[in-house]
Amino acid sequence: MRLFVKKTATFQNDTLCTSDTQVDNGKQQKTDNGAVVSVDDAFSVPVTILEKYIDGHNRKKEYIASEDPVDTNNVEDISAFWKMVWEEKVEKVVNLSEAVIGKHQEGEYVHYWPDPDSFKKFGKFQVTSTSEEEYADYTKRVFKITKGSKERTVHQFHYTSWPEKGVPDDVTSVVDFREKVLNAPSKLNGPTIVQCRKGLGPIGTYIALDILTKKGESEGTLDIPGCVKNLRQKRQNLIQTPEQYRYLHKTLAHSLAARSITVSGDKFPKYVKDARKSELKQQFEQLQQSFKPDSEEVQKKEGEENKRRLHFSVIPDASDYVNAKFIDGLRVKRRYLMSQTPLPETVGEFLTLVIEENISCIVSFEVEKELKKTDGIYFPGCDMDALKKGDFEVTCTNEQDTNGSFMTRSLTVKSGVLQQNTDGKPIPHYQFLKWDMQKNVPTSAAEFLSFMKFVEETANKQNRGPILIHCFDGASQSGLFVAVSLAIQQMSEEHEVSIVSAVKKVKAARTMSIPNQAQFDFCHDCVLEYLKASKADRDTRKK
């Protein structure tokens, strides 16, 4: 029986050409333009799976560009996709669809994998989900696919934060995501499936990033327009919009900025010892070149872009913007909110931010116990009369000094206008004090980690929104806190770390973060201290 499969398209001389494809039932055929078509053996129905071989850097047919599997007849059997995975010896699937798979005018997108710790049968194939790990921007799944007595492992990397026709908010997360894909084990040397809902813009952006990064690293040259043109000749609209084209340039800048070396915990001490001679200095210089301070005009523009729009204005004639920037944690989106210490005239906006975002705790890097006159005072002295600012009323209780390292307080922020946005519970406030102002680093890695652990544990217990971190410029001290937090999270959960990746992520949000070599080295010192403390803790438990 001959089946008609959805028309494939090629982009030739700025015109869209289509060709019908005829397929024998139960066999995989290739169209004249190279598309791969799989048809389920069990059903004589059209299966709408559109694929396209794409050559990689110095490798033929490195990718199969595909739209998400769609069953046009609403039959849940999607064995055609898994048949293709098996026959093409695919071990890695990169899915760039948003988290919720929804409706499409030509059919319904199918959840083509089983739930965690379960299995489904798709025609001749049994697919078992052996693990699923959720991160801030992506989910990693591992499947065991069985056909008869034969068995293979397939890794799916599902980037869940890519709008269908837009681009992700975070540039560095896609770069890190690509590194995870490359580092996944592979034995069969088959192509990587790269898919999204319509098989277009996100796929082209990701594949171009991978090809051009490899080319840039190996040859030191890039031809971005040429690469994009080649992709679009293979499949129309593989980069759909000017926004996606600009995003490709940004991701390449970060991908090639400084090599993101990932080091396992057991090898990290030796790596740091060897790298201190020259490599750490070189890495920091490369980062600074990539994120070097722009002209005053550009910095002003960046400052405007960093300003977060407030939904409410509770101070007469006050601005409805505040200079703050969200950064994702390893697994939690918008985990951190970096902000400038408020000025006297922006206290209202700062307090509005605290309530609107349901802040879990506030971290201050104003290292003097008493705020300077140039700072906006947003809380009163402990057990003193409430501070009133416009519609806000703030009280402070339970102030304690923790061995001179940091201060702890409980703040209660009330507002008649924003009453519906607060549960009335005290907000923990932590003020770090042990900062070497001359070197612009904390005086002790151990004390800094102790402070960070205290903050993270409190934030986890609060079950609220992000951790709000502020310093005088919103970057030079707050950025170190976030970078070290990201590095420690990665080492704790994955037993490996890339300090460069953590620093890139923070500097992409605030270019003035990690402003000197001392802070970059301090990030490494903190991971060393964490590993030392972890070993001591394990040794104690054994006794």
Image: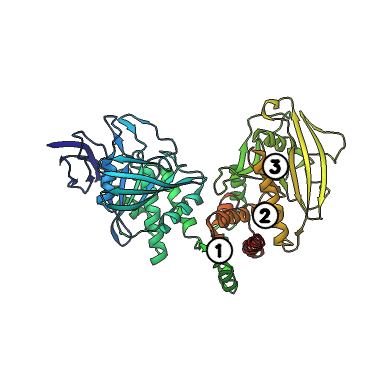
* Amino acid found under the numbered disc labelled 2: Ser
Q: Which residue is mark 3?
A: 361
Residue 103 vs residue 136: left or right? left
Amino acid type for the residue under numbered disc 1 = Gly
Residue pictured at 78% horizontal, 46% vertical: 408
Tell me the residue at 54%/64% (across/down). Answer: 286
Marks 1 and 2, how far apart at CA: 27 Å
Chain-order first, disc 1 or disc 2? 1
Whether residue 446 is visible, yes or no, is: yes
State the quadrant of the C terminus: bottom right
Closer to us: 28 or 246 = 28
Q: Would you say 510 lies left or right of 386 here?
A: left
Residue 467 seen: no
Q: Please, what is the three-letter code of the amino acid marked with disc 3?
A: Cys
Q: Position of residue 399 (x, y in %)?
A: 82, 44
Foreground disc of the pair 3, 1:
1
